[in-house]
Image (spheres, grey):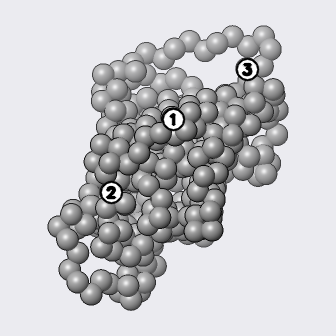
Amino acid sequence: MSRRGWVLFTLMSVIWGIPYLLIKIAVEGASPPLVVFARTAVGAAILLPLALRGGGLRALRGRWGWLLLFAVVEMMVPWVLLTDAERHLSSSLAGLLVAAVPIIAVIAGRIAGDREPLGVRRWIGLLVGLGGVALLAGPNLSADGVLPILEMFLVAVGYAAGPLITARRLGDVPSLPMTAACLSVAALAYTPAAILTWPDETPSVRVVAALAALGVICTALAFVLFFELIREVGPARTTVITYVNPAIAVAAGVIFLGEPLTLSIVVAFALILAGSFLATARSRPAGESAPAPAAAGGRGTAKDGTADGAPGRTAGHGDA
């Protein structure tokens, strides 16, 4: 990758690795619906004017049904479930459980009609990755811990389903107007719940700062940088941030919140990482030679068949 590509990649890895920390802080003084409302409203307020320039929302005509479905499964449901789960789980555990998204995406793809042969390597990856998830979730499956784990599972399912909708129904829709529209819809949907759960006391500066950072940095700025990263290195390379985000989430939780870093967490993360890598690897047909590496900043061919820099599958969620 080019130097600019590495800078964007590093920024995205960090920015989508810290939402778990910020959400953990935000729920100290704000309800889950209020956290989601603040995040989506701030993000929409920043991105919507950018999308409106040049009539960008015209590209969404005739797609509002699929856009609404995407907003529901990618933002509205996962973000409130993630926030509610973090009232009971550590931020590092939440980040690691979301790391199973690539594994669930393989399963979701099969259910949705993907007929690419899995092969022994990918089956091993699925089993290894799911073993890592079981190692993480097992100790938390007490009477009080089942619901947060179930919520995190549904978060991962939503994050895996969102890119499928994008790839199959919204692949030709410009990313910035689509994101701005989805954030706006989510903010409007959560306005009543945010009002009803508004705290009696003014949240602390720490909580307000976390909410602002979620909206400005982890949503608005993140999506702008995300689009730039796709244009710079292509959608295939961009997906690699999925493997880096959980490490950032764990490090942030340990350093800033004093969360424990146990041997089981390290082993589980290694299993999920290895499983994701193996499960998402695509088999090259016999006799096909490896593609020549693209020049820095050039246009190659991504793993999903889209040209680097062209609209393609949504890569990774990090927080998301």
Q: CA distance from mark 1 to mark 3?
A: 36 Å
Mark 2 closeness class: few <14, some 14–19, many ≥20 residues within 10 Å: many
Residue 89 place in picture, x, y as percent: 48, 59
Relative to 316, say whether 204 is above or below: below
Residue 21 place in picture, x, y as percent: 35, 53
Q: Which residue is painted at 51% across and 14% down in the image?
A: 293
State yes or no: discs 2 and 3 in contact (Cβ < 8 Å).
no
Relative to 58, say whether 225 is above or below: above
Q: Which residue is painted at 59% across and 46% down in the image?
A: 136
Q: Which residue is nearer to you in this view: 38 or 147?
A: 147
Residue marked by disc 1: 263
In this rendering, the label closer to the viewer, 2 or 3: 2
Type of the residue with mark 1: Leu
Outermost residue, left side = 205
Secondary structure beneath label 3 = loop
Label located before the other in sequence (2 or 3): 2
Q: Which residue is painted at 63% across and 68% down in the image?
A: 143
Q: Which quarter of the rendered picture does the N terminus lie within? A: top left
Mark 3 closeness class: few <14, some 14–19, many ≥20 residues within 10 Å: few
In this rendering, the label closer to the viewer, 2 or 1: 1
Type of the residue with mark 3: Arg
Label located before the other in sequence (1 or 3): 1
Residue marked by disc 3: 284
Residue marked by disc 2: 22
Residue 129 place in picture, x, y as percent: 66, 38
User: To which quarter of the image does residue 65 belong?
Assistant: bottom right
Type of the residue with mark 2: Leu
Residue 272 place in picture, x, y as percent: 60, 37
Left or right relative to 260: residue 60: right
